[in-house]
Image (spheres, grey):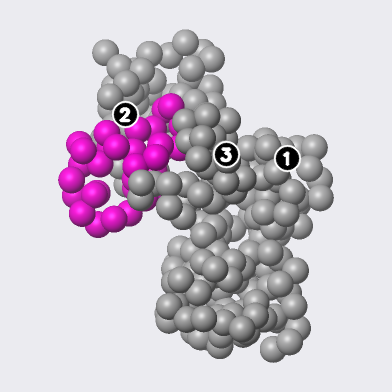
């Protein structure tokens, strides 16, 4: 157990305050909290960090043994294989846009949490760090990781991740999404685009796919395509 606890400690993918709140428990130390987390099966375990979803990772790791801890599996195997620890963190994408960060290859998420966030590394194509901090000066003053803030609480406060995705508008348009309490950006990436929903009043998902058959054929999320390539290529957002 001690080796496993040390591995989790070194990874920095464990947030005691976040875990304490999720479990409604008070822990004497970080090690105490980690030991509690590691003692539970994945089906019962709460997420150890805002950027590590136990259910998400377990559902996408068929080789994960029923009794094997999801975070330990990620630290030993999944991170090197580029498996996603959270729907909004893609290790392969992180490495591709932060190519000068060779030290990130072993575990991109640990790298982001240790140094990437403070160094301004891009973490998701639809999360604009500078825009988020400018739009939310209280977050900037608090000196917290803006991406973690958005994932943990920002979306619940109707804060948008960038100018390209309007959280308030999305929830107003799609009351079913609001009723289930899911992060609107996660919903759009996972289901919304496929269902023809729009991320803002300025972007028409169905139009963009019909007007750009190459994007539809590629199966890339249309808004991500627009942000990364389409905008620079002058592609239209809506009729």
Classify residue 169 by image quadrant. Answer: top left
The answer to whether marks 3 and 1 mark residues whose Cβ atoms lie closer than 8 Å is no
Q: Residues within 10 Å of mark 3 (few under 14, many from 20)?
A: some
Between the residue at mark 2 and the residue at mark 1, the CA separation in whole angstroms equals: 29 Å
Pair 2/3: label in front: 3
Q: Residues within 10 Å of mark 1 (few under 14, many from 20)?
A: few
Classify residue 194 by image quadrant. Answer: top left
What residue is disc 1 on?
119
In the rendered image, is residue 16 in sight? yes
**Spot occupied by residue 119 in the image (x, y as percentages of width and height):** 73, 40
Specify the label residue 223 is tagged with. none
Specify the label residue 140 is tagged with. 3
What residue is disc 2 on?
200
Kind of element beneath mark 1: loop
In depth, the one of 146 and 124 nearer the eye is: 146
Classify residue 201 by image quadrant. Answer: top left
- Relative to 164, does residue 119 appear above or below in the rendering? below
User: Quick check: 181 left or right of 90?
Assistant: left
In depth, the one of 57 and 143 nearer the eye is: 143
- Relative to 152, does residue 120 appear above or below in the rendering? above
- Relative to 131, does residue 174 appear above or below in the rendering? below
Say which label, 2 or 1, has the lower sequence index.
1
Question: What's drawn in magenta, residue-wise?
Answer: 158-187
Tell me which residue sits at (25%, 41%) in the image. 171
The answer to if 171 sits in the magenta stretch is yes
Question: For the N terminus, which image quadrant?
Answer: bottom right
**Spot occupied by residue 236 in the image (x, y as percentages of width and height):** 38, 13
Say which label, 2 or 3, has the lower sequence index.
3
Kind of element beneath mark 3: helix
Tell me which residue sits at (24%, 49%) in the image. 177
Tell me which residue sits at (59%, 58%) in the image. 83
């Amino acid at each position: 157990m001690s080796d496993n606890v040390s591995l989790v400690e070194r990874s920095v993918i464990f947030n005691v305050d976040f875990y304490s709140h999720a479990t409604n428990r008070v822990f004497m130390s970080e090690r105490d909290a980690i030991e509690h987390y590691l003692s539970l099966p994945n089906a019962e375990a709460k997420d150890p960090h805002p950027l590590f979803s136990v259910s998400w990772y377990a559902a996408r790791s068929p080789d994960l043994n029923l009794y094997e801890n999801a975070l330990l599996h990620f630290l030993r195997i999944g991170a090197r294989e580029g498996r996603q620890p959270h729907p909004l963190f893609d290790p392969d994408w992180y490495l591709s846009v932060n190519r000068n960060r060779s030290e990130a290859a072993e575990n991109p998420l640990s790298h982001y949490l240790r140094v990437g966030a403070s160094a301004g590394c891009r973490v998701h194509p639809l999360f604009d760090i500078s825009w988020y901090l400018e739009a939310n000066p209280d977050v900037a003053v608090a000196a917290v990781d803006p991406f973690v803030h958005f994932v943990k609480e920002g979306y619940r406060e109707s804060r948008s991740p960038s100018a390209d995705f309007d959280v308030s508008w999305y929830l107003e348009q799609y009351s079913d999404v609001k009723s289930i309490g899911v992060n609107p950006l996660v919903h759009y990436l996972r289901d919304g685009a496929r269902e023809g929903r729009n991320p803002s009043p300025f972007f028409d998902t169905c139009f963009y796919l019909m007007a750009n058959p190459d994007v539809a054929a590629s199966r890339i999320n249309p808004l991500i395509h627009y942000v990364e390539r389409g905008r620079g290529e002058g592609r239209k957002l809506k009729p």
